[in-house]
Image (spheres, coloured by chain):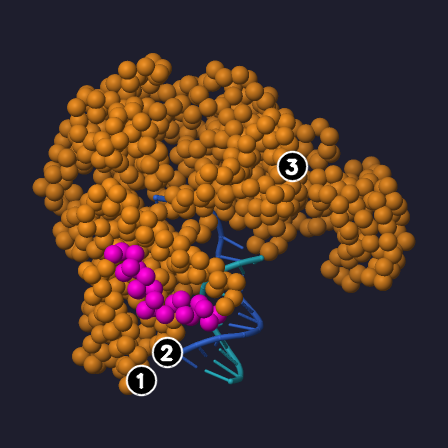
Chain colours: A orange, B blue, C cyan
Amino acid sequence: MLTEDLNQPQREAVMYNEGPSLIIAGAGSGKTRVLTCKVAYLLHLGLAPHQILALTFTNKAAREMRERVALMVDAEQAKRLAMGTFHSVFARILRTEANLVGLKSDYTIYDTADSKNLIKSIVKEMSLDEKIYKANLVLSRISSAKNNFIVANLYAGSEHIKQDFLMQIPRVKDIYSTYVKRCMSANAVDFDDILLLTTQLFKEHPEVLEKYQNRFQFILVDEYQDTNLVQFLLIKSLAEKNHKVCVVGDDAQSIYAFRGANIENILKFSKNYPEAKLFKLERNYRSSRNIVAAAGSLIAKNRRQIPKNIFSEKEEGDKIKILPAYSDVEEALIVSNKIGDLKNRFGYDWKDFAVLYRTNAQSRLIEDTLRKRNIPYVIYGGLSFYQRKEVKDVLAYIRLILNTDDEEAFKRIINYPTRGIGDTTISKLSSTANLHHVSLFEVASNALNYALPVNVGTAAKLKSFVTLINELKAFESTMSLYDFAREILLRSNIPQTLNEENTTESESARENIEELLNSIRLFEDMGKEEGREGIKLSDFMAEVALLTDMDLDKNVETSRVTLMTIHSAKGLEFKNVFVTGLEESLFPSIHAMENDTELEEERRLLYVAITRSEEHCFLSYAKSRYRNGSLQYPSRSRFVDDIDPRYLEFPMDRNISQSKSIDFSKRDENFFNSFSKPSLPKHLVRIGDNSKPTANNNTNLSVKEGMRIEHERFGIGTITRIDDTPDGTRIYVDFETSGSRVLLLKFTKFKIIS
DNA sequence: TCTAGCTCTGTTTTT
DNA sequence: CAGAGCTAGA
């Protein structure tokens, strides 16, 4: 029986399908299992796979669920489930119904970089100050409006515009409406549009909505706490007719408010469906009792939450260990050492470890250290493969060929490889195109008709570019995807250009492009295997646009330590988890320290991080860290103090101050002062600060072999050797955590301990 | 129009 | 620190 291995609340949640239900699923409570069983159960009850709509936030989650369903029912059925991310499912629907919202079905999906570039162009064209109307800021305003279902012509009457005035950016309204128009005339949508336009479509075309209401007999939504208003509306409208909808979420794990997610949706759900059944999954099967208790004590500091009692019946386990470090460098060393140590002691595999951080930038040091120790690792996040310059260049060719209206693709490649068409010509093209409400490509194709003010030479260059694109277009019908893509690549002249450069970068660029072609071939072959007829390159492009770094195959066969942001770690679990950078203004982020709402979200983020761990969890922080090129002295994160100390273990052996009361923020001096115990005479050696190094009077300073010193960045160590060289005195130090180093005395900041 | 080199600036999380 | 944008000179 399908529900055999489930506990009571899980089974009830799976078997109740008569109406709407809300499943509050605590961390590690077997949520995926419940969802999977539910899908299998619905199939068992006789629903056809295509009648079940299951929405997730990541492709990975969708894939995983499909695979697990396939194990319970037959693979054929699993394949036909309507399962995917919000964006991929609704992008498909939008493609089918494109003409109803003024798009063509081969529309392009703009990624964030495309959107930003478009905004930049618009700001320039409107002669606004780019320093005030920063692309990032404007995009986030537009995105937030879209997520809240505020279309361009309603923006003027919205709360948003009031905030814009306060922020002194009143013209966002105009940028927004121009942006929408430009996307439309480029036959392009951005990420938010995929959901927004579908919502609009359903609103304005009840007959279309009804078609999908009838098709989707049952709707499941994962990570419901992370849905925004538009997603809420989409689910609401689709479920309106037969109320067969089940949403699963955990308010304690809501970490996407910055993207418009609204916890209110969970509360609104019960309001919207008064008959909704509520199920709570409170037993955590993942983590030791200590970890669950520690996480529980942390999240208890948040005010707004749905009451629940998460418990574990696993063994008590070790306490969460706090790992203080002198510097970011040392933090990385400690983490790497601990990983090696645990592996040796308990026989873990590399893949049993994850190092999590708040910001992507933190990965660098950890990466460096792991590499030095020969510890294999994978990094998720950051630049994804499809965002790399060379890959985007090739994709832009493909995009323009498939959709010549694609403004951003046009701009990207009109002069790459260089063909003598510069900014001047591009802005002429732009203004002419805007004037006549046509695409850049259209103007370039008929420069004469539009009276484009360019000289004969430029006109000829434009013509040959247009001819190239048109010729390539003609190949589509005659070739396989792979051959077509290869033809595009060859004719684009990109490979030749890279060959000429002949640098390490151009070498890796060529490899990446080769990789891109391989993925096109793979896509084509898979399609054939699955018996899908008439796959087109546009299908590949549609898929690629919605792929993230998480979805890429990263050589999963080899066992490696995982490095990722906490956000990307949601939904995953590891035996051992290191949460790094627990420092004020990093975690919680400096941007989130102003109000409680944001602070609570950061706290939930740490909650998510801790609850990823099954057996061991470590929280590390550094007393000094390089950020944006300058050294900073943060204090320990307040969140460490939010956890009940009964579940924490602080180090005994090292005398890093536990108190947070010292203000490190002012000057270097404070940092050193904080080290010295007030009663002791200050042996602080601090030579070569910014004032000129008062040369040799430091050489006979009282350093001796065997002395123990405490270094700002490397921690505690013993001097093993002292050498006088023409450059000054060199000291050889064996550091406890960071190994041996040779330091030039006059530039070294340290304190003598004994 | 292109390129190299300089200055400036920003700097969270992501489908 | 790294990426973007700007300037000067070719």
Chain designation of label 2: A
Q: Position of residue A195 (x, y in %)?
A: 25, 45
Chain designation of label 1: A
Decide whether residue A481 is among the magenta residues: yes
Write the residue at 38% across / 40% down.
Answer: A257
Element carrying mark 3: helix
Location of the N terminus of chain A (image quadrant): top left
Q: Disc 1 and disc 2: Cα gap in Å?
A: 9 Å
Q: Nearer the viewer, residue A121 or A89?
A: A89
Q: How many marks?
A: 3
Which mark sits nearer the N-terminus, 1 or 2?
2
Which mark sits nearer the N-terminus, 3 or 1?
3
* Horizontal relation, residue A626 to residue A565: left or right: right
The residue beneath circle 1 is A457
Q: Disc 2 and disc 3: Cα gap in Å?
A: 54 Å
Q: Quadrant of residue B2?
A: bottom left
Amino acid type of the residue tagged 3 in the rendering: Asn
The tag on residue A19 is none
Q: Nearer the viewer, residue A563 or A270?
A: A563
The tag on residue A337 is 3
